[in-house]
Image (cartoon, rainbow, N blue to C red):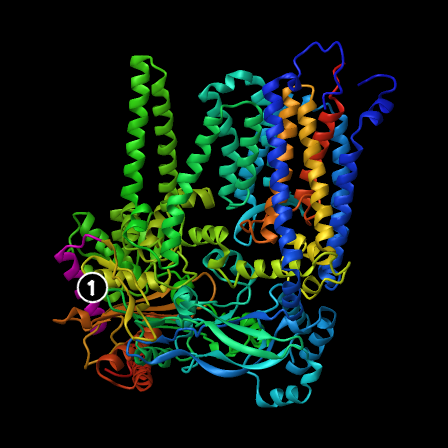
Amino acid sequence: MQGDKKSGRPQFRPGQDRFFQFRILVFAAVTALVFLLLLARIGALQILHGRELEAAARNNSEQYIKIPALRGRILDRNGKILAFNRESYALVLLPARLKKKDAEEVAARLSRLLKADPAVLKRRIINGFERPYDPVVLKADIDFQTLSLWAENSGRFPGVYETVLPVRVYPEGSLACHVIGYTGDISVNELDRLYEEGYSSRDVVGKAGIEKVYDMQLRGVDGYRRRIVDVHNRVREEKTVLEPTPGNDVVLTIDATIQKSAETSLGKQKGCVIATRPTDGEVFALASFPNYDPNIFLGSIDRAAFAALLKDPGNPFMCRAIQGRYPPGSTFKLVVATAALEETLFSQHTRYYCTGGWFLGDKYYKCWTWHGYQDMGQAIQNSCNAYFYHLGYDIGSEVILRWAYRFGLGQKSGIDLPGEIIGRLPSHAWKKRHYGQPWWDGDTLNLSIGQGWLEMTPMQVNDIVSCIVNRGEIFRPHLMKEIRSPLTGETVLPYKVESISRVPISERTWAVVTEGMRRVMTDGTGKDGGYSPVLKMAGKTGTGEVFSGISHAWFTGYAPYKTDKPDERLVMTVIGESGGGGGEVATPIAASVLRSVYVGEDPAAVKRSLQFHVESQREIKRLRLQGMVP
Amino acid sequence: MQGKNSIMDTAAKFDYVIFGVVTVLVVIGVLSIYSAKSGVEETAAQFVKQIMWASIGMILLVVLLVIPYQKLGDNAAAIYFSCVFLLLLTLVLGRKIRGARAWMGFLGVGGQFSELAKLGVIIALSRYMERMGSDLQDIRNFLIAMGMVFLPVFLILLQPDFGTILVYIPMALVMMYVGGVPIIYLAGVVAVGVTGLSLPLISNYMEMTGQDNQLTYILGSTPFLLGCAGFFLLASAAGFALRTFTARKGWDRMSFTGAVFFLGFTCAFLFQNILKGYQKKRFLVFVNPDLDPFGTGYNIIQSITAIGSGELFGKGFMKGLQSQLGFLPEVTTDFIFSGIGEEWGFLGSVILIGLYMTLVIRAIFIAYNAKDLFGSYLASGIATMFTVHVIINMGMAVGIMPVTGLPLPFVSYGGSAMITFMLATGILLSVDLRRYVH
């Protein structure tokens, strides 16, 4: 290679350097050696072991077949089963046994047999060829008729066989469906997100609720079966080489009885009911209506039913407790009152006069009736808007907004459910950004009674009362009580109670606000709807007004009012979406659930009687105004 | 080059062998893809696309042939930093496919820029080494050169893509060896890598296979790694101080050794504490596929079976049992050699390796004969790039190399890789064309 030396080379040429020459030669020699080693290995494979590997290839004797792990169960706090697996017959395809060119034809036949979408089925089969020894589930939970129809014509479905496959069953139907969620085949997006966690393309994953949040715990580890087949694809030997590890059971904090009471009580009213224990954040009931029956996803998702649910204007998949945004209305007055007592020199004895409203400049902001002189306790009891207009104007919006943030507004509650929203806690900067206007005093007045731009989820409202009951401590609301091994029954992962914030609330403030809340139930806005001589409740009603349409009915409170055992207390929040007044619609629901919990009454009957009580009291009031009765 | 009969001139000096080898390889690739995917209509279009990529690549090759390669050197900084920028952009905007954010594109046009960045690094490093000349003996300049290589490597590791590091590091080491960088420095780099990977690997491997004991636990524990790192840092600092005060060159060795092991233990510490469990597991499976016998391990077993069953003469075109029945995974990309080995047998393997050897050895002679050092470095870098791709891709198909996504040059399906290899060939031929000094 020195042959191309030419005369008259003016500059340095690398090839002239003896050391350079040596290094290039070493480089070339090492490279050639590496290639020869590779060739040697290939030669060893193809010539020395060629015969045996050829035979192995012809038989392709070894196949690994996945055994899906049994998914963990979901239990309520008393061990009642809310989700488990039932054995069902399924039709499965082993792609290795199907010739690619037949795939389309077989898919068409299968879609007629299983009454499934041919395009979906075809895609699933084509994708299956990527890992030919992973069975593709065509349809789980098939009925006997389909099975026998298939068995008669099994020759026309190469590669398809029947197997027993567990399907997810929710024995209580729609009970707590928003908490439990449902499962389905992993989607492309989910796979991208979860690929690194060891998921693969034919997995079943939780799509919503606890099934989704604790999927890693519930899914377990798949096992494998080794199958040795001969030239004619007859199975010679079959052995489980890796036992599947079943998924762990998730024990919820939900109490199925209370949950059932809550759902019965809510009835056909759009909205939600939340019951939590304030001392540790355990959620005892979380009901939301409209709901759905997760069993429609049994086997594989029934597309028509699923589409119908998606199109439902009531939006049954929405968990209103954490995904519904509503103006909190008068329930927000608890925050304003606490802020005033804690942060300013304001006294609970100061009285403001309600003339049926309050003048700011020349604009009259209305109260819902005429109250006369009101101190703070009375204002909470009667939900007097005029008082809170005046109070809010005095203490200013900054104080209110700061305290609202301390109570957890503008933040997620942190409950272990997917898709929680933040709601909206407005601020001066926020208004400037969105409306290009400064914060007016009128905005402060609207804020003081929980209207205006304020939007909260029922869970956030529930946290306000929990905080007050706890004298300032908020625990993260949670649904998982513990994760349990299905084999030993031992707790694998207990829930660690987490205090998420401490709001400084003094003894005085606590007493004023809780007494006010108690008086709501004895003499105030919750008197008729929450009439319960057997159980001392405290609470606050609210009516979240919207620009168009019917107002949302709120109730938030707790029971028993006074107790030696704060652990036995429940905080309850109810919203009746477009239900009307809080005292008339939401309060009977809350009271009936609480009475069923503490007194053991039938929630439906209690609710009916309370509604009747509300109506009769309203009628009496009307007659009294007309002078018909004394 | 701008002479009257420049075309004749060019035609006379043009390396037809390399061009011919590349063309034959592309044809082999297209035929294999056609054979492997003939059954499935949805992917049958792959071979058409591959022809398209090869054609685009050929055009780009000619473009690079016309441009004097020294122009690349003049713009080395711009080329290098655009590559780094594209890698950064990929991390932000890239589409996540199978857990790695490696592909980026707009309006359907895009690619894996980690492929193109290989050329950027070769060009920049060649330029830097040419400029430095014998100053590369100075460890500071050597460290700057390593930094130039590690910046893109780091960005690619973030995607995450472990396989690519196997191309960059040998590429840089070979180029520097050819450039006359002291062997001790290169050995230092290897030592850092060995220390940084072996300790956590041993510790984690033992833990995963249940053979862990007190010793293997300690090897991967934070106090041990940090303690060692601290010790070697002190040793290095002491060596440096003594060298400064006594002015005796012997202390340099101590300071150098200390620094190497300090870096090694620091890497081990970072490996242990930054990577998450599943990432470590993926790395271990990458080293030993037996840890995942139903995933990656299955692929290798299938691949070995297919290649072995090809025997001496193979089963013939489109008659491969394994690939035709779809037992082989990724048969058009990572495991394309499995299909070739099965259908063309040992004879085909010899021809294929012969073609690659011709290409690479020819490239090394181009490095030998180049007009200037810049050309030499370019050609050595490109020769190493081809070698590493071939060895690792075919090596993993026969079970002697870890499974990575490295494509077989010109043969594997994939646009980014095809265009990168074509560009590399263009640079190679351009260096060859201008070997005579006028």
| x and y, in percent, of residue B387 in the image | 63, 39
Relative to B42, A130 lies left or right:
left
Q: Residue at x 73, y 73 (%)?
A: A102
Is residue A83 shown in magenta?
no
From which residue to which does the magenta span run?
A503-524
Q: Residues within 10 Å of mark 1 (few under 14, many from 20)?
A: many
Judged left or right of residue A327, residue B125 is right
* Label 1 element class: helix
Residue drawn 51% across the image and 60% down it: A190
Quadrant position of the C terminus of chain B in the picture: top right
The image quarter in which residue B231 lies: top left
* A459 lies above or below B238: below
Q: Residue at x 17, y 65 (%)?
A: A515
Magenta segment, principal secondary structure? helix
Q: Is residue A147 left or right of residue A607?
A: right
Image mark 1: chain: A
Q: Which residue is mark 1?
A: A469
In the image, A20 versus A339, the foreground residue is: A20
Query: How many numbered marks, from 0 up?
Result: 1
Q: Position of residue A379 (x, y in %)?
A: 23, 62
Above or below, B230 relative to A177: above
A514 in magenta: yes
**Measured along the vertical axis of the image, is residue A180 above or below residue B171?**
below
